[in-house]
Image (cartoon, helix red, strand yellow):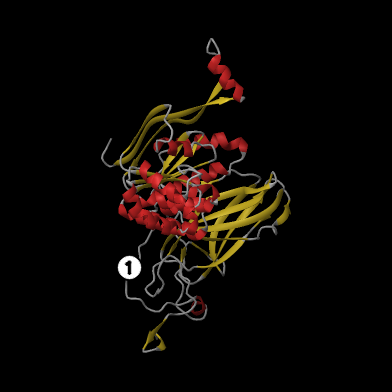
Amino acid sequence: MNGDVAISVKNLSKSYRMYGAPSERLKELLHPFGKKYHREFWALKDVSLEIKRGETVGIVGRNGSGKSTLLQVICGVMPPTKGTVNVRGRISALLELGAGFHREFTGRENVYMSGAIMGYSAKEMGRRFKEIADFADIGAFIDQPVKTYSSGMHVRLAFSVAISVEPDILVVDEALAVGDEAFQRKCYSRIHDMQKRGATILFVTHSASVVVDLCNKAMLFEKGELLLGGAPKTVVAKYHKLLYAPPNRVDAIREEIRASSSAEEETDKAHEETPEVKKPKRHIGPEKAATGGKKSGAHYDPNMKPKSTVVYESRGALIEDPHITTVDGKKVNVLAHGEEYIYTYRVRFEEPSYGVRFGMMIKTKTGIELGGMVTHPRGEAVEYVEKGAVMTPRFTFRCGLQPGVYFLNAGVVGIVGGAETYLHRLEDVLMFRVQPEKDLLFTGMVDFSTEEPTFVKGGLVYDKR
């Protein structure tokens, strides 16, 4: 096992015996000729992977794809049926809700018991207890039986214990989705700290944005197989394509993804420009650009085409000709900060459709969703669209982004089988660049300013001009 590898899994398979009724288990055990009453269910099938030290890896997949089983085998909670698992370093796990805690014991007792299982003395856990209790923030419930805890309280304490031992490897199985938003933010902040410290982090989640934001690698599982591993943006896009596919196309799309298992993250470096760091000057806001500010340099670059486009299966609609224009109709894909633009596309309906809404999303090159718009709120969709109709949604937006390269999605949803789903969707169908400017004053990705900054001096507020 290479010294840079924290987790190595080779040819791993895990099967369960499935019985039609509880009595069949006893019949099989007592049958004089060893007759089998069970059928085998393979939760994992010949999985091989390596996770390097310091990597943060997100595992995605539909329910029943084997994600949680993989984590349980890696953590040693259950043995593999075939294959090997090697883990190098101290591992701490937050698996399904309830795992690792005794319901009849108090929170305090469970903290000490968990520490003992991980090899810590009672004295060492006593030294860490205040930090654990403060992070969990469950008050007097720390001395109440765990069976009286809400799901949120349970997660608070479990995560606090898991991170308190400063593990080399942290494994999390979707549990953070249970906590409230404030606690989730605190947890992710601590995860960022662990990343800086060089810890290896492996977690299962259904949140695509978390995978893209936190991870430097992602893996897609389906029916116990590792279909795809690679850059989070690429893996998440393929996962969504599979997730929203019509039932009769799932098998074909699964094979497409398997065939593209060597896919790597699309960086589009050839189209990315890194702005120079220069002395800040006043920027021209949208109101000045419209009334005599400098002339826009927005234009169209025919060579700027995305290579990471993912096309969903059509369910009665087709999106055509997505593009960006200026407010006066000029087609552009190189934009100027502070100006307004229109993103538009056509949708051709090949089948009658119900409850129709249209949307768009702007993402960074790493896949982080910066923001989007829809044409109708939930409950106010277009009730019926006839076959053969063509509709053209238009989304007007102000370009308040830092110089760099961004990507656009286009989507149309409707009611199919009583639930809202994508009738068609295109991810990364269009890319655009925000050109560098010398006079920008905002930091981060998005400009939230409404007026030029002022500064305070001697108790008085001065306009910086």
From the viewer's perspective, is 75 left or right of 290? Answer: left
Above or below, 423 relative to 135: above
Along the horizontal axis of the image, is 68 left or right of 276?
Answer: right
Q: Is residue 280 left or right of residue 379?
A: left
Measuring from the top left, give residue 31's x and y in whole percent. 55, 13
Residue 131 screen position, x and y as percent: 38, 57
Place residue 129 in its image quadrant.
bottom left
Q: How many marks?
A: 1
| 115 or 106: nearer the viewer | 106
Q: Helix, strand or loop at disc 1?
A: loop
Residue occupied by mark 1: 276
| Rendered view: 203 above or below 381 | above
Is residue 194 in view from this perspective? no
The answer, for residue 359, to whether it is visible in the render is yes
| Residue 401: x %, y % from top left | 45, 66
Q: Residue at x 52, y 53 (%)?
A: 152
Q: Position of residue 227 (x, y in %)?
A: 46, 37
Depth order, front residue of 300/58: 58
- Residue placed at 59% from the left, 21% from the top? 24
Q: Nearer the viewer, residue 2 or 259?
A: 2
| Front one among 428 and 14 | 14
Q: Residue furthest top?
A: 33
Q: What's the residue at 43%, 48% (across, down)?
A: 109
Position of residue 25 relative to residue 427, above or below, is above
The answer to whether 360 appears left or right of 110 in the picture is right
Q: Quadrant of residue 11?
A: top left
Q: Look at label 1 and name its amino acid.
A: Glu
Quadrant of the image containing the N terminus: top left
Residue neighbourhood size for the residue with mark 1, other residues' Cα within 10 Å, grouped as few (<14), some (14–19), many (≥20): few
